[in-house]
Image: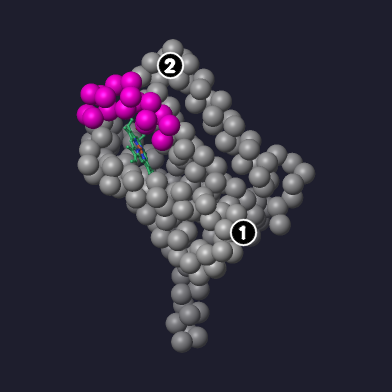
Amino acid sequence: MPTRQNWFDGWRLFALLSLTLLALSIWIAGMRSFEVEGVRMVIRFTARTSLVLFCLAFSAALALMWPNAWTRWLRRNRRYLGVSFAASHAIHAVAIIAFAIMDPAGYAAATSIASYIFGGIGYAFIIAMAATSFDRTAAAIGARAWRRLHLAGGYYLLFQFMVSFGKRIPDMPLYALFLIPLVAVFALRMIAMAPRAKQTVQAG
Ligand code: HEM
């Protein structure tokens, strides 16, 4: 159970992270007088904060391999980091809507049918995963369905981050750096799964 005495655990961690992201997003948009360029900066900012929060939540399996204070904190708070990721992506969505309203031509040039389909599936997963991140809703769908949803959603979002950052690499090679945490998280999860997979085979 998370301790609720400090701001770095539990729902307080979520409040701290999401309010900080909201304040920073308003500040960033304000730096460009709330014009479209500021709104686009918020879209990019929240894509990156989402990346960090997603990678933290999705790497909680680390605690199984290397139990220490940091990985235990990660595992204890994966739900709150996951919901903070959803909050970060909610700001991404609000900024996207603002971009579409303020500069329809620029917005049309920056998006495509593919971004609606893949981005739409991504948001469907984010909403479903956030909605089932409470004790009551998680119990309502059952442990098996919960695990399937969060596993499928996690890998889908990993894929989506790779595509969204990856497609910008030809124009901006430094974007390859964003792929490093994604590849690392994927590799760690594969390594963490390996002993369990072996045990299952032996048991079978
Ligand atoms: C229908 C849903 C979505 C739409 C319409 C959308 C739209 C956009 C737009 C217009 C940009 C470019 C902003 C600019 O260049 O000024 C952008 C950037 C980005 N989006 Fe989204 N997005 C959606 C969902 C998602 C999801 C679900 C993810 C991740 C799981 C995601 C990750 C990203 C990333 C990584 C960037 C690049 C940020 C950067 O340049 O640093 N988007 N999105």
Q: Secondary structure at mark 1?
A: helix
State the count of labels. Answer: 2
**Residue 99 lies in quadrant:** top left
Image quarter of the N terminus: bottom right
Question: In the image, what residue type sits under mark 1?
Answer: Arg
First to last magenta residue range:
93-109
How far across and how far down the image is residue 53, in percent? Answer: 51, 43
The answer to whether mark 2 and mark 1 are in CB contact below 8 A is no
**Residue 19 lies in quadrant:** top right
Q: Residue at x 53, y 56 (%)?
A: 132
How far across and how far down the image is residue 187, in percent? Answer: 42, 58
In this view, which residue lies farthest toward the top? 33
Q: Which residue is mark 1?
A: 136
Task: Note whether ligand 1 is within 8 Å of mark 2.
Answer: no
Question: In the image, what residue type sits under mark 2?
Answer: Phe
Magenta stretch: residue 107 in it? yes
**Of residues 199 and 51, which is closer to you in this image?**
51
Q: Residue at x 41, y 35 (%)?
A: 93
Q: Residue at x 50, y 43 (%)?
A: 85
Q: Is residue 50 left or right of residue 18?
A: left
Chief secondary structure of the magenta portion:
helix
Q: Is residue 159 left or right of residue 63?
A: left
Category of crowding for the residue at label 1, using alpha-carbon neighbours closer than 10 angstroms: few (below 14), some (14–19), many (at least 20): few
In this view, which residue lies farthest toward the bottom? 204
Q: Secondary structure at mark 2?
A: loop
Q: Which residue is mark 2?
A: 34
How far across and how far down the image is residue 180, in percent? Answer: 40, 45
For marks 2 and 1, give the CA distance. 39 Å
How far across and how far down the image is residue 128, in percent? Answer: 46, 53
Does residue 183 appear in the picture of this structure?
A: no
In this view, which residue lies farthest toward the right? 5
The quarter of the picture showing ligand 1: top left
